[in-house]
Image (cartoon, rainbow, N blue to C red):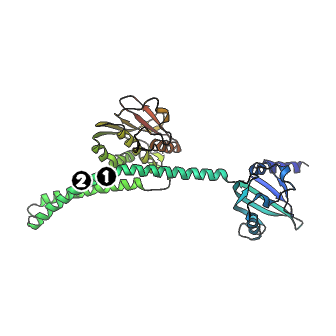
Amino acid sequence: MKKYKFQEQIINRSMNGIIACGMDEFIRIINPAAQEMFGYTAAQVVGKKKMKDLMPAGENERIVEALKSERYGGKDRINMIEAVMQSGKGHQIPVRVSATVMSDAGDDNGLLFCVRDLREMRRMEREMADQEKTLHQDKIMSLGKLAASVVHEINNPLSGILNYLRLMAKLLDKGQIVEKQDKFSSFLDIAISEISRCSDILSNLLTFSRKAPISYGPVQVKDLVERCVKISNHKFELQNIQLHVDIEDSIPNILADANQIQQCLINLMFNAMDAIDGPGQVWLTAGFDSGKQQVFIHVKDSGKGISQKVLPHIFEPFFSTKDEGHGVGLGLSTVYGIMRSHGGDIRVADTSEKGTCFVLEFNKLV
């Protein structure tokens, strides 16, 4: 008797749905998890419904065929197969099914099904896909802002390279390369330096634009900040905004996805520029708080600040204080999502009339 009670408790307390059918296909046992999953009580099902009554047309036949084959764990058994079942209200439920033919003294006497509800898993998969789509959309918007400034940033050194190459060609034509070798070498060094600068700009821009899977690893904060400065520096110059960069020595590496954190920082730098009407200043500071064991990055601007009325809403998706056509309100919500997924945080340290200071805080250190 005790053994029977113990087995009954295993069936009734299983988090997965358990259903047993006789050879006549009528359901004999349905545990509470399966009842909740399909929206039936045991009284509505036991002896009254067959397994195929809980499935859309054709699905039961597919599982029976799988049981007959040996592809899913051997004859008369299924280790795991994905299927679709149906609730009492007609809603389709994605499930993962394990099944076996039950026998007694060599004679088959029924079927046992173990059913796992996949709806929550599918919901999480959709959320992750939506988050990735939002991240990519926000990145494309940032790339659009960078495009014009990068064209100017690359065009200037290319014009200089072209002029120096023309001068070098003239020296060659006039046969003066020997007597003016120092000048020729100087022109060549400048051209090489400018080409290297163009290469760095393009390399950093391509790294930022690449749609890569999330990859956590050690990230050097100094290198990351300097990379962001390189690809956005000319945009600051075009808008007549001075950028002040202060990075402490010996900042511990953080455990993060470098591409996503770079996206956060670029977003905050763009927001800082947008907050300034006319000439202004932006301060970019990175350091380590040994007391809190936190790495921090501050982005402060000399703009108009954020009102107390607006402040509670700034991290909400699609909330924007910018004029129509100048933003859809994804930037800060994307930064917030990235930081929280990294176990860190973003907060506003200063909302005075003299500007705003956003703080990125990282708790996972390497």
Numbered label attached to residue 156: 2
Left or right of residue 129, residue 106 in this image: right
**Residue 213 horizontal/vertical position (percent):** 50, 55
Asked if 235 appears above or below 321 in the picture, the reply is: below
Looking at the rendering, which quadrant does residue 305 occupy?
top left
> For this rendering, which residue is in front, 144 or 211?
144
Q: Position of residue 99 (x, y in %)?
A: 77, 61
Residue 164 horizontal side relative to residue 331, left or right: left
Q: Residue furthest right?
A: 1
**Amino acid under label 1?**
Val
Taking depth in this image into account, of 260 and 41 the one nearest to the observer is 41
Q: Secondary structure at mark 2?
A: helix
Q: How many other residues sit within 10 Å of disc 1, few (<14), some (14-19) or many (≥20)?
A: many
Looking at the picture, tell me which residue is in the foreground, 327 or 114: 327
**Label 2 amino acid?**
Asn
Query: Tag 1 or tag 2, which sits nearer the N-term?
Result: 1
Name the residue located 36 percent from the left edge and 37 percent from the top edge: 275
Q: Is residue 202 above or below residue 251?
A: below
Q: Secondary structure at mark 1?
A: helix
Q: Is residue 6 left or right of residue 250?
A: right
Mark 2: few/some/many CA within 10 Å (<14, 14-19, 20+):
few
Give the labeled residue for mark 1: 150
Judge whether residue 193 can be spotted in this image: no
Q: What is the spatial separation of the Cα atoms under label 2 and label 1, in whole angstroms?
A: 10 Å
Of residues 87 and 230, which is closer to you in this image? 87
Q: Are marks 2 and 1 in contact (CB under 8 Å)?
A: no
